Each structure stands twice: as structure tokens, then as C-alpha cells.
Amino acid sequence: MSKRMNHDESERIRTAFRLYEIGEFGMRDAAAFAGLGIGEMMTEANERDIPSNYDGAELADDVEALR
């Protein structure tokens, strides 16, 4: 990530990804919890080699959001 994070921000992102990885959060919820936009969170996931767990429910949410 381009901006420098403080310890609290970094810890919130780590916690968000832990919850994402166990299925408690989708990417959008993880981003909101971490205080990031969805694009920023996806960039963080790529930089940290965190695999996507995008599923049908998230797809349905995204389709609904586009309506």
C-alpha cells in the first residue's frame, strides 16, 4: 500500500483478513472493517498473497448493488 500505516491500521487490516479467511467477512465487509475502500483491500490481499474466497452469495450481492 502506498501510504504509510500506523500500528492500529495495520492490526485492523490483519484482523480483517483473518476474519475474511475463515469466512466471517466477505471482501467488502473486511474492507469496511479495516477502513479501506474495496479496491485498496483487494490490493492489500494481492500484496499479502491472500486467496479470494469470492462466492455465489457475494456475486448476488454485487449484481444487486449494480441494479
Image: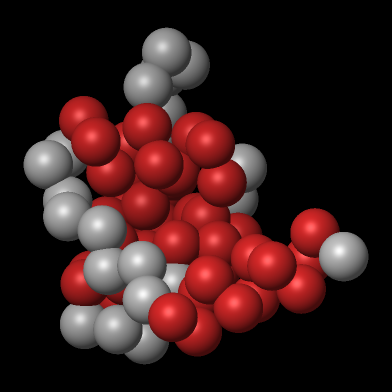
Q: Which of the pair 64/49 is nearer the observer?
A: 64
Q: Which of the pair 67/31 is nearer the observer?
A: 67
Residue 45 visible in the picture? yes
* Residue beneath the point at 47% across and 16% down: 3
Q: Is residue 59 above or below residue 48?
A: below
Q: In screen coordinates, is 60 left or right of 21?
A: right
Task: Tell me where residue 37 sits by quadrant.
Answer: top right
Q: Is residue 31 above or below residue 16?
A: above
User: Which image quarter is the C terminus in?
Assistant: bottom right
Q: Which of the pair 5/67 is nearer the observer?
A: 67
Q: Is residue 32 above or below residue 36?
A: below
* Residue beneath the point at 52% across and 55% down: 31
Q: In screen coordinates, is 36 left or right of 2?
A: right
User: Which image quarter is the N terminus in?
Assistant: top left
* Residue beneath the point at 21% across and 30% down: 47
Q: Is residue 24 above or below residue 53?
A: below
Coordinates of residue 6 in the picture (x, y in percent) = 40, 33
Q: In screen coordinates, is 38 left or right of 41?
A: right
Task: Tell me where residue 7 sits by quadrant.
Answer: top left
* Residue beneath the point at 50% across and 34% down: 40
Q: In screen coordinates, is 24 left or right of 3?
A: left
Residue extending furthest toward the top: 2
Residue 15 visible in the picture? no
Coordinates of residue 64 in the picture (x, y in percent) = 76, 73
Task: Tell me where residue 16 sits by quadrant.
Answer: bottom left
Coordinates of residue 4 in the picture (x, y in percent) = 41, 18
Q: How many marks?
A: 0
